[in-house]
Amino acid sequence: MKLSVIASLYRTDKLESLDEAREILKLSRDQALRIAPNLYHHLAFINVVEEGIVSGPRVGLIKEYKTFKVLIRLGTCKSLVHIFLSQRGTTKIPGVTDLGLVPRHVKKVSILGGGLMGSEIATVFLLSKYYVILKDVNDKVLEAGIDRIKANLQRHVNKGKFSQEKLVKALSLLKGTLDYETFRDVDMVIMIIHVPGCIMGGLLGLILEIPLYTSITIIKIPFTLFKGWYRLIHDLISCEGPFIKTACIPIAGLTILLWPIAVIGSFIMAILSSFFIGLYRDVIIYQKRSFQRGIAFVVAMVTEFDEYINDWLYLREGSILLKPHYQNNKGSRYCELETVDLSTKMGNMLPGSEGSAEIS
């Protein structure tokens, strides 16, 4: 068996001539550069095959060994290994894969909105031979979305990835509509109409959230600085808090000196957190399908932030800012703005107090 393997290694009767082989490899190399210009392992494989054909099988095996040692250290190899292990890991999940669930077969997809994102998604489905129903608000917008899809498919034809016959066949799978009657037999509905609002909401959230957080933090910095110094010096003199033991006195002095740095760090963290909270407004808009509730979420988070700092610095309870409700309210479609008088509500909750208050 070993001798037959070695003998087959040196067989060349099924190979083309050297010039023809080089021409085939050149075409393969050009195709790899056109399809995946950022991936190296395709070209490496072609180089190994060329080395084996030109210089012989032994040199080709040595070239393959050296190339493998280089490729295995690339990020592409690590990513492929991670994907492989992830796929294997998701094949056996307790409570999921052992329930006998069968994947639903998708043949027809409906897309709401034929803008830039909707047309790109429709193009991907058409290239994968799915029936696509594109729904929009009027004829003009619908025709514009279909034209975008045609332009996307034509771009694939111009690049040589798609033939003209396949283009015609892909367009035959596309249907435009202005109503929901054709949605009865679809397997999947993709809503794109809320995405532009989410994007605009996220940008508006950043515009509102970052300045408001920054303003509140700048106003409260003097209170944080001097109240922190007062507390630290008081604990040091009275030997309370973290400075009960004498050995902690050097640490106390260092803490007092470095307290401004801690205040500046908290200021920076507040600004960074406002960035992510502003972006989370996109999620609220998409979940609630309401631009107004996204604005209410931003204002509510600023109010919560102001209340937290006031409690931490032992300032007045609550906040002077409005605290809107961005969750769904019974009997109302819109956000209800109301100020909260915490002292009144807490007083009404005490035993023997008259009346009651509903904390929302």
Image (spheres, rainbow, N blue to C red):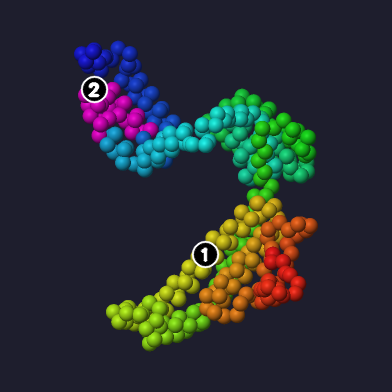
Q: Which residue is mark 1?
A: 273
Residue 344 vertical position relative to residue 159 in the rendered view, above or below: below
Quick one: 284 or 127, which is closer to the camera?
Answer: 284
What kind of residue is marked 2? Gly
Q: Secondary structure at mark 2?
A: loop
Q: Residues within 10 Å of mark 2 (few under 14, many from 20)?
A: some
Earlier residue among tags 1 and 2? 2
Quarter in which the C terminus is drawn: bottom right
Based on the displayed image, in which of its 4 quarters is residue 7 positioned? top left
Q: Which residue is mark 2?
A: 56
Residue 317: give x, y in percent of width and height.
61, 77
Quick one: 149 or 187, which is closer to the camera?
Answer: 187
Query: Does residue 278 appear anywhere in the picture?
Result: yes
What kind of residue is marked 1? Ser
Outermost residue, front side? 352
200 lies left or right of 159: right
Q: Residue at x 55, y 31 (%)?
A: 99
